[in-house]
Amino acid sequence: MSEKAQLHLNGKVYELPTVTGSEGEKAVDISTLRDLTGYITLDDGYGNTGSCSSAITFIDGEKGILRYRGIPIEELAVKSTFVETAYLLIYGKLPTHPEKARFSDLLTENENLHEGMKHHFEGFPPSSHPMAMLSAMINASSCFYPGLMKSPDSESFEVQAARLLSQVRTIAAFSYRKSRGLPFLYPKPAYKYTANFLYMMFSDPYGSYELKPEVVRALDLIFLLHADHEQNCSTSTVRMVASSEANLFASAAAGVCALWGPLHGGANQAVITMLEEIHASGDDGRRFITAAKDKNSGKRLMGFGHRVYKNYDPRAKIIKAASDLLLHTLNREDPLLDIARKLEEAALGDSYFVERKLYPNVDFYSGIMMRAIGIPTEMFTVMFAIGRMPGWIANFKELLDERRKRICRPRQIYIGPTERHYLPPEQRR
């Protein structure tokens, strides 16, 4: 029998049920609170509010644990691929050989955009941000497939999910080439997911981009590490939009918009900007660390700290090691990586940052890794969106499969004027 929480309010005692997750997380179920008491809860920024029950991703921020469908991120980073991990997130299990082959075939069959979509790209000015194009074109894509406007059944969902996951990289590559005035390159069916994206991004019409295995693996790892991260801003946005029975593409386009914000998906760009400023000033990071502890300096140590993790972000450990290996393999040096290492060393040895539990997060090293691959800074958040797509699709499916569906509709505490009346213009002061 589950425990009950007691709420003492206005001389009355109310009992509220509790919920315990499979990993021991505990919650007080307040779904009947307003009906019982007339009160709601107020939780600015939803820091203590569980918006749903989910079987997709588990995070223990205190211990630095991240698992997709129960499998530690450390195992997936070494043993899996982005496409296999996408299947795991969406369908809840690792695919068999036939399932993996079918999923791969569906991705290949749906990788091309409708030719009519090329005209939409022409309407964007060259200065358009790739995230703006990505969101708009994902939404526009649904117009070319009338079936997307209907709530999918299990069979049509499989095709829709594959189409979105496959086309997002094509749209992203086209967006990049549009911003650079380069001709579009169609995907090659012979190439696997990440290799195909690099081919479309960087090839010339007269010569294919050299697909180095270490570069392909590095970008695939970035996608995998970003594939899901529980109920973050963009994922909860996808679920909220999907709760209105909006289609998968519209829900994902909303996720892109949420991810675009500098406090969410734009954080890795901010890290690179910070490192470039430190390098340009002739600092090796030590002066910046001192300034970051001064509230009046205007300096902030980007890439450290996380809303959920109060320990070292497990993804950061993986991507740091991968960055070192990639630069070594490519025989390439990056002064920003040297500064990043010194910043990390200084911060982890400084009580100011340790006491505040400000440890490096995934954004701290992912930008450096993408620089080494050749991804321009304005495309960093787009890489995040490609990687996060399986998680958004999985959350959409989880909501779709719920028997008791409710549209998301948060409450608020109104703090505006009390009742007042309309005044004609001559009486206004």
Image: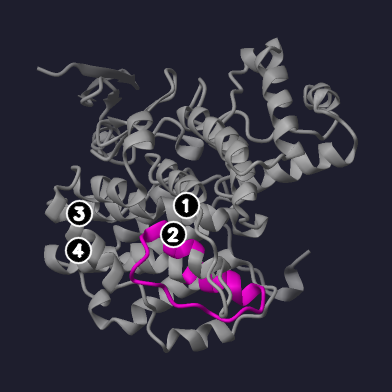
Q: Choose mark 2 or mark 3, whichever is in front.
A: 2
Residue 245: in sight, yes or no? no
Separation (CA) of disc 1 from disc 4? 26 Å
In the image shown, does 124 or 81 lie closer to the viewer?
Answer: 81
* Disc 3 residue type (three-letter): Lys
Residue 13 placement (x, y as % from top left): 25, 18
- Compute the Cα span from label 3 to label 1: 19 Å
Q: Name the residue carrying label 1.
A: 216
Q: Is residue 128 left or right of residue 250?
A: right
Residue 158: numbered disc: 4
In the rendering, which numbered label is found on residue 375?
Answer: none
Q: Amino acid at mark 2?
A: Ala
Graded by Cα atoms within 10 Å as few (under 14), some (14 to 19) or many (20 or more), the crowding at tag 4 reads: some
Q: Quadrant of the N terminus?
A: top left
- Horizontal side of residue 251 vs 313, given as left or right: left
| Badge 2 or badge 3: first in the primary sequence | 3
Left/right placement of residue 267 relative to residue 116 reads right
